[in-house]
Image: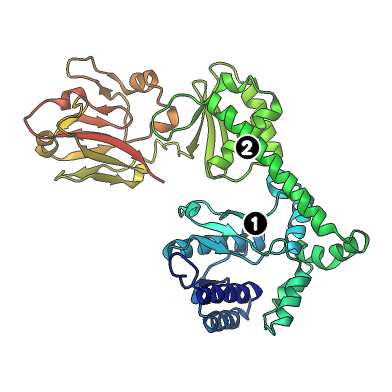
Amino acid sequence: MVLLDALAHWVQKRREAGAPGAPMPQPLAIHIHHGLSKHADDWLAVCEREARLRGFAFEARRVSVPGDARQGIEGAARAARYEALASTCLAHDVGWLLTAHHANDQAETVLLQMLRGAGLPGVAAMAVEGSLPVVGHRSDRVRLLRPLLDVSRETVRAYAKARSLTWVEDPSNEDRHYLRNALRHDVMPAIASHVPAYRETLARFARHAAQAQTLLDQLAQLDFEKARAPTVGDDERLRRTQLQGLDAARLANLLRYWTARRGLATPPEARLDEWVRQIRDAQAEASLELPHGEAVLRLYRDELQWTAIYEVADPDDVASDVVLRWTGERAWHLPQWKGSIVFTPVGDDEETSGSIDEHVLRASALVAKARAGGERWREHAQGHSRSLKHWYQSRGVAAWLRNVPIVWQAGAIVFVPRLGVDGAAQRDEGGARWAMRWRDEA
């Protein structure tokens, strides 16, 4: 309520002063309805009333918070809240999201993260300005601003009383079952009695931690670029031999950085130590699978890479054949193989090798079949056909990427994902040329 009131006052003053530049847009107040309290509907009504009284646009988002979430109900509510805030901001083309975190919140967060054994990113706590803590939604388009972060709770309350503001007290804030509440009511007052400036001290510590983490990220970025293997597109692979030249702490720093870069949760210390040990001890031809959340860190042919969790095909559970009469489709979705075959026209000034004639595609039905073993493929019409196993090995296609459909037409192989159009199917029939490629999908 204090932030809402102060912002409304600021907007009014700028409009009255005729501030230069574009007209001041109508600010938007966003309320997240978690559905966790029997008072939630009443809180929504209060927030809408107070926002509209001050000339704000208003939008409420309802979220579902699982009660059995692994990160606890507080963590799950926070994740759902920021996800909803991000999507709402993007829907309204909002560039700045302001929240009312204050100095007491910052001190509690620093101490809470220290007690949980968090690393530097955790104890660095909250920044005055930053990005939304969500993955996806192109959330980097929205900046998070905490204008009250250096203001104490006591000052916030004094402002509210001076402005005769009314506000809602959440009863759960008194529940000491939650560690943050226990710190707020039991621990912080005891600390304040001995160290009155504890908020400033913890805030300074958080700033130092943030600076240290920035330096570690810069070092990790240098190590990342030095170890990065040449790849096509957005694929990221790191050379094992380069990584083995790093000491354990520096390698752990790089892996922690790479995990965050991929949008994954920070690995626990024990898991990170195990990764470091296995990577440093790996022999030249070793293969590793290091699962983490919804991804796997794999070592294959002397290169580390992040992949999705690919399911191993069950020989007793063969996917059914799928038939397509091609009439110009740009994508052939094959969800049982978690992917699609993409058809792209080849321009007149583009290389046509490896492409397929439109007349061939239309000649008869295309059939996607599961691999049965023994299939053979050739790269060029004049080349020798060899087993798929031979081609996959020679091109470095990892075993976990080989559970893909083979496209047949009139009893002959037309296309093999990760290899390309069969040489015999590349014949020229005088029609437009099309490229075919496989696209992995979740």
Q: Nearer the viewer, residue 8 or 349?
A: 8
Mark 1: give few (<14), some (14-19) or many (20+) Cα within 10 Å. Answer: some
| Three-letter code for the amino acid on which mark 2 is drawn | Asp
Residue that mark 2 sits on: 217
Does 229 appear above or below 306?
above
323 sits left or right of 68 in the view: left
Q: Where in the figure is residue 194, as x and y percent of width and height?
A: 93, 60
Q: Where in the figure is residue 419, as x and y percent of width and height?
A: 30, 27
Q: Which mark is residue 128?
A: 1
Q: Where in the figure is residue 196, as x and y percent of width and height?
A: 88, 61
Mark toward the viewer: 2 or 1: 1
| Three-letter code for the amino acid on which mark 1 is drawn | Val
Lower sequence index among marks 2 and 1 = 1
Visible in this render: residue 163?
A: yes
Q: Which residue is at the far left? A: 430
Does 329 appear above or below 56?
above
Q: Where in the figure is residue 336, as x and y percent of width and height?
A: 35, 45
